Image: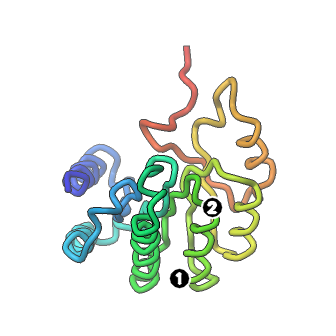
Amino acid sequence: MESIADTRALLAAGERLLGGAIFCTFGCHPHNYSEYDDAMEQELLAAMRQCGHKAVAWGECGLDYYKNFYDAQYADKRSRMVDVFAKQARLAVSLGLPLVVHSRDAEEDTVSVLRNNLPRDHPVHVHAFQGSVGMMKQVLEMMPKSVFGMSGVYTFKNVYEHCLDLARNCPLDRLVLETDAPYLSEAPRE
């Protein structure tokens, strides 16, 4: 799991260059759901322990039926995706850590996992969200400590109107401005 080594290197650089202003999360991204097992979970937990107070949440985990389109067409694989996400949601609760959620083209199942596996007051960060206003409102109401991350795509000259609708409909105290560097950075400057 090269991402663990990368995270450690970033934390060390943050200590050296930024006075410790870098924090991290650990979890199994939905693109890697098929690799999640007890051994991976133990490796992630060990890395989290090694990072101490710098590890501040579990995730990014969740469901991505866009990137995992073909797997999502098979009931057994789709069920495995949901199970991996649900297991990580329960783990975040047991660790007392916020859950960082990735949801793409999987709104109904994402809401179901949140509803069935997290206490209502558990902190949730729905990361780089570009889904529907309906799902956002449903989660905001269902989970009063949830926030929605909106990325640099909102700064693009030709931003999708539905993204602007999300920003207009998200209460400011529940909106997080974020990047998903280098993938969803802000519009390039000249």
Between 155 and 15, the one lying in front of the other is: 155
| Picture quadrant where residue 46 is located | bottom left
Q: Position of residue 100 (x, y in %)?
A: 49, 64
Q: Which residue is mark 1?
A: 117
1 or 97, which is in the foreground? 1
In the rendered image, residue 35, in percent from the top left (x then y), is placed at 26, 63
The residue carrying mark 2 is 107
Check the image and name the residue furthest to the front.
74
Q: Secondary structure at mark 2?
A: helix
Left or right position of 37 against 73: left
171 relative position to 70: left or right: right
Lateral position of residue 28 relative to residue 82, left or right: left
Instruction: Locate residue 1, reporting x and y percent.
Output: 20, 56
Residue 56, by quadrant, is bottom left
Q: Nearer the viewer, mark 2 or mark 1?
A: 2
Mark before the other along the chain sequence, 2 or 1: 2
Q: Residue, x 69% and y 25% (percent of image)?
A: 158
Q: Amino acid at mark 2?
A: Glu
